[in-house]
Image (spheres, grey):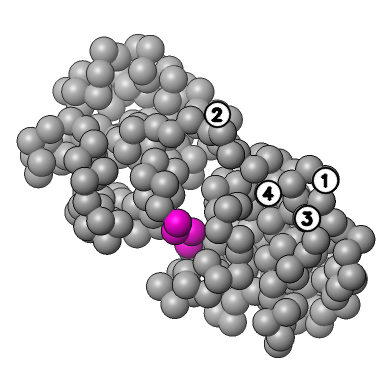
């Protein structure tokens, strides 16, 4: 692993960092050591953007689930502002539940993402009450991680990666969410052998990334990578990982 730097990140001058620049442009990283160096380089970018987030405030599970819904539409900063706008406009989540999605969206923005997110949130809240007869997810604190994940996945539009976000960011479980974007990016960087968001790949990434930095790494994927590392025609020139990504170097070759 790369040597820790003064800001809690990693020292770019540490021995072995040059391996990031010398890998095959095909993105195939054969050694576990090289994979770990790539994971450390990605962690460095995450720490530069978000810091260690050691003293961050924990949100209630439902608040985090709604915030995470926004994460995948807009930036982390804009998503946080959207959550605050809803909490200021509506008395509680039950009032959001009985409101029309267009009314909810009007409290956020006139942009298409606001209506799309509002439709998902209202549907989620209605199904939460229908299944669990309550408008919160505080009961998740009393469950195991697997039980909490299963409860979340029963809700509409809550796949495993989104459920894992709640486990990590609200329930403080040591789990690194692996979405399609995360798996694809790690594959292109040579960290994974395939681009699929499988449980096996999740376990491999959890071994390669430092557990104490799961939160900033995940937020970096949501905030900076998801909007650039597209399945087709990735926006490598806009991605902060481009200098360390073999796939980006290959795409930029004349």
Residue beneath the point at 34% across and 59% down: 160
**What is the x, y in percent for residue 161?**
40, 57
The nearer-to-camera label among 3 and 2 is 3
Question: Which mark sits nearer the N-terminus, 1 or 4?
Answer: 1
Check disc 2 and report the residue beneath it.
Answer: 78
- Secondary structure at numbered mark 2: helix
Residue beneath the point at 69% across and 56% down: 43
Rendering quarter of residue 41: bottom right
Question: Which mark sits nearer the N-terminus, 4 or 3?
Answer: 3
Q: Is residue 221 visible from the viewing direction of this image?
A: no
> Is residue 18 highlighted in magenta?
no
Viewport quadrant of the C terminus: bottom right
Instruction: Report if the CB atoms under discs 2 and 4 are less than 8 Å apart.
Output: no
Check disc 3 and report the residue beneath it.
Answer: 4
Instruction: Report if the CB atoms under discs 1 and 2 are less than 8 Å apart.
Output: no
Answer few, some or many: residues within 10 Å of disc 4's Cα (few below 14, many 20 plus, some between 14 and 19): many
- Secondary structure at numbered mark 1: loop
Rendering quarter of residue 52: top right
Residue furthest to the bottom in view is 30
Question: What is the CA distance from the residue labelled 3 to the residue labelled 2?
Answer: 31 Å
**What is the x, y in percent for residue 215?**
54, 48
Dominant secondary structure of the magenta stretch?
loop
Answer few, some or many: residues within 10 Å of disc 3's Cα (few below 14, many 20 plus, some between 14 and 19): some
In the depicted view, which residue is nearer to us: 10 or 98?
10
Check disc 4 and report the residue beneath it.
Answer: 46
> Is residue 177 highlighted in magenta?
yes
Check disc 1 and report the residue beneath it.
Answer: 6
């Amino acid at each position: 692993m790369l040597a820790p730097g003064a800001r809690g990140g990693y020292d770019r001058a540490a021995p072995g960092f040059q391996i990031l620049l010398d890998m095959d442009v095909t993105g195939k990283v054969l050694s576990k050591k090289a994979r770990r160096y790539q994971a450390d380089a990605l962690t460095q970018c995450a720490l530069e953007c978000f810091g260690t987030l050691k003293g961050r405030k924990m949100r209630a599970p439902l608040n985090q689930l709604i915030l995470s819904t926004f994460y995948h539409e807009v930036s982390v900063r804009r998503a946080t502002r959207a959550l605050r706008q809803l909490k200021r406009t509506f008395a509680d989540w039950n009032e959001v539940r009985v409101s029309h999605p267009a009314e909810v969206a009007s409290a956020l923005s006139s942009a298409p993402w606001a209506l799309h997110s509002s439709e998902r949130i209202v549907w989620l809240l209605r199904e939460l009450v229908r299944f669990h007869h309550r408008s919160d997810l505080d009961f998740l604190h009393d469950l195991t991680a697997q039980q909490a994940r299963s409860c979340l996945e029963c809700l509409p539009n809550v796949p495993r990666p989104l459920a894992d976000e709640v486990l990590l960011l609200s329930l403080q479980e040591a789990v690194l969410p692996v979405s399609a974007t995360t798996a694809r990016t790690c594959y292109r960087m040579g960290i994974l052998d395939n681009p699929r968001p499988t449980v096996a790949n999740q376990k491999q990434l959890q071994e390669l990334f430092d557990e104490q930095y799961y939160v900033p790494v995940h937020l970096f994927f949501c905030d900076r990578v998801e909007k650039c590392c597209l399945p087709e025609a990735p926006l490598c020139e806009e991605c902060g990982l481009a200098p360390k990504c073999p796939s980006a170097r290959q795409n930029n070759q004349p």
